[in-house]
């Protein structure tokens, strides 16, 4: 055994929706522990900010990156940085994105400020290329380290078919660490861009939620479509379509995964246009 901490825990504690039953959680902090963790069927958990986990939990082990895999070395790599371009050391997939964005701002390092307000971990945000209208994760990536049961490899964004809310990395391939590609800028300038991007969140609900339920079809706001279908405020059990923004489902307290699934089905039934789920449903 490589010494990973393994514990049976309720996943509700690890999701922003606050829903989800138990699983065997593997807290891994280095490559050897990660290699051992992927020897049996597994899922990889990030910030839990895009997940609807079943009340029954999941049968697979759930991997969570901690320790050095949740730390960021933001020192510019002299061999890869030049002029205004800064390539950092390794940033662990388990690093919380909001804190990283604040640190980069203070250091006057630009490219990722558009992702302000996304309560993800770096690995999860990279895996789905999380973003806003003002920027996305792939604006600031240099190298990605990816772990699978077959081994560890490094890729660059050019190797991947990434786009709106997708990285091209297959589900289950673990983003263990990345190097960031940033641009030197004045801290005040980065802060101004962050504040601007953050304005777009004023209309988003403050309650427990996994973010937007559906991707925007063809650039149209899915929230607007759900709103136009008259569904704001619709409730099933402890879950509700947010009155503030119709693409958010919130947990009023005591929501079950079945409540959330019922609301997703209601939206699909009432909205004419085809909608692609952004949430990940476990299992
Ligand atoms: P999780 O929810 O833990 O997992 C999601 C998926 O990523 C799963 O498939 C999981 O297996 C996979 N994953 C997690 N970690 C890794 C890893 N290290 N390697 C490989 N795969 C991994 N999203 C946006 O794009 N833009 C927004 O503006 C936005 N705003 C939000 C606001 C709120 C209040 C909330 C709650 C969510 C918002 N989201 C937004 C949704 C969410 O933050 C993103 O989808 C984010 O990418 C999820 O990352 P995570 O680390 O929380 O992943
Ligand atoms: N609108 C409505 N009713 C609603 C919601 C929105 O009429 O219930 C209208 C708004 O008035 C506005 C337009 O639709 O005119 C767009 O709304 P908004 O600015 O909120 O943007 P969005 O397209 O709904 C996207 C992302 C968010 C991201 C924001 C801000 C998707 C699926 N959603 O929302 O990302 O935070 O832009 O950049 O791409 C997420 O992906 O989880 C997420 C929260």
Image: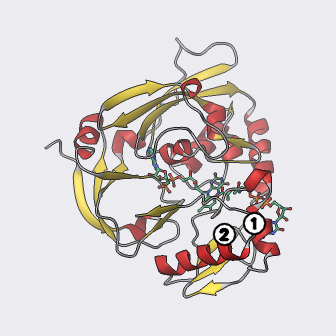
Q: Is residue 207 visible?
A: no
Mark 2 and ligand 2: say if the CB distance to the nearest ligand atom is below 8 Å: yes
Decide: few, some or many residues near mark 1? Use Cα within 10 Å; few <14, some 14-19, many ≥20: many
Residue at image location 48% in from the left, 43% down from the top: 123
Mark 1 and ligand 2: say if the CB distance to the nearest ligand atom is below 8 Å: yes
- N-terminal-most mark, 1 or 2: 1
Q: Picture coordinates of residue 84 (x, y %)?
A: 70, 18
Residues 76 and 113: in front is: 113
Residue at image location 75% in from the left, 74% down from the top: 244
Identify the residue at the far bottom of this view.
Answer: 237
Asked which secondary structure carries label 1, the reply is helix
Q: Picture coordinates of residue 20 (x, y %)?
A: 41, 71
Q: Disc 1 vs disc 2: Cβ atoms closer than 8 Å?
A: yes
Q: Position of 223 compared to 30: left or right?
A: right
Q: Position of 166 compared to 47: left or right?
A: right
Q: Which residue is mark 2?
A: 248
Q: Is residue 263 visible?
A: yes
Residues 67 and 120: in front is: 120
Decide: few, some or many residues near mark 2? Use Cα within 10 Å; few <14, some 14-19, many ≥20: many
Q: Point out which mark residue 223 bears.
A: 1
């Amino acid at each position: 055994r490589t010494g990973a901490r393994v514990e049976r825990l309720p996943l509700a504690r690890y999701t922003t929706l606050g829903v989800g039953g138990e699983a065997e959680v593997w807290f891994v902090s280095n490559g050897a522990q990660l290699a051992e963790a992927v020897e049996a069927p597994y899922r990889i958990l990030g910030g839990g900010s895009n997940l609807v986990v079943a009340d029954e939990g999941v049968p697979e082990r759930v991997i969570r990156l901690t320790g050095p895999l949740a730390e960021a070395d933001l020192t510019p790599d002299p061999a890869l940085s030049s002029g205004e371009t800064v390539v950092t050391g390794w940033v662990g997939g388990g690093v919380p994105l909001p804190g990283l964005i604040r640190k980069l701002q203070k250091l006057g390092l630009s490219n990722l400020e558009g992702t302000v307000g996304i309560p993800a971990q770096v690995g999860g945000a990279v895996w789905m290329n999380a973003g806003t209208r003002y920027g996305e994760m792939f604006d600031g990536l240099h190298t990605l380290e990816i772990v699978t049961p077959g081994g560890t490899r490094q890729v660059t964004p050019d190797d991947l078919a990434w786009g709106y809310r997708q990285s091209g990395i297959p589900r289950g391939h673990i983003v263990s660490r990345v190097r960031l590609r940033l641009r030197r800028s004045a801290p005040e300038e980065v802060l101004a861009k962050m504040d601007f991007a953050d304005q777009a969140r004023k209309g988003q609900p403050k309650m427990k939620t996994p973010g937007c339920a559906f991707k925007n079809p063809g650039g149209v706001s899915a929230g607007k479509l759900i709103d136009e279908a008259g569904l704001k405020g619709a409730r099933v059990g402890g879950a509700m379509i947010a009155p503030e923004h119709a693409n958010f489902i919130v947990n009023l307290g005591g929501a079950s995964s079945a409540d959330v699934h019922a609301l997703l089905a209601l939206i699909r039934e009432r909205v004419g246009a085809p909608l692609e789920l952004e949430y990940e449903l476990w299992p």
